[in-house]
Amino acid sequence: MKKIIAAAALLLAAASTANAQTVNAGKYTVEGTNLDGSSYSGTAEITLASETTCVIEWETAGVKSTGVCMLNDNAFAAAYVLEDALGLVVYHVNGDGTLDGKWTITGKDGSGTEVLTEVK
């Protein structure tokens, strides 16, 4: 787990840009695609822990997962646990506040997609 978090931090440092974005604490809708291309939906909740770190909890298809997340300019990443596997998702923070992501999970080939939209 520490290696995944360190890799996410390095990835975020490399993705830094001049135009800093923000991610709001709160509830989000989730729309995504699984590794096999099928779609899923659900909810996520982000709780800020500091200016750059947070906790994120997803619920999709009745399954809950929790992760630690980090914001660096317009890159937002989370390392998470889903059942018995570790995963990593990296989002691009869009100007409208949506989070446009790609994710992967240990022991599986490929990547899925995910969009988080804040519930206002």
Image (cartoon, rainbow, N blue to C red):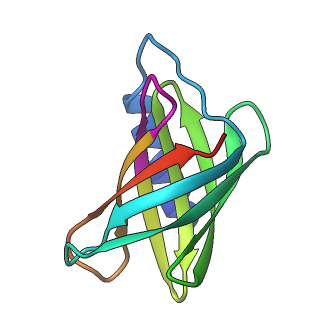
Give the image location of residue 59, x and y in percent. Answer: 59, 73
- Where is residue 88, by image quadrant? bottom left
Residue name at image x 63 percent, y 46 percent: 119
- Whether residue 89 is in magenta: the answer is no
| Closer to the camera in the image, 114 or 29 | 29
- For the N terminus, which image quadrant? bottom right
- How many marks can you see? 0
Of the pair 117 and 67, the residue shown nearer to us: 117
**Between residues 9 and 76, which one lies in front from this camera angle?**
76
Residue range of the region highlighted in magenta in the rendering:
90-98
Horizontal side of 10 relative to 70 (left or right) equals: left
64 vs 60, left or right, is right
Q: Residue at x 27, y 80 (%)?
A: 108
> Residue at (72%, 41%) from the top-left corner?
25
In reply to whether residue 92 is colored magenta, the answer given is yes
| On screen, residue 40 above or below 32 | below
In which quadrant of the rendered image does the C terminus lie?
A: top right
Residue drawn 36% across and 62% down? Answer: 32
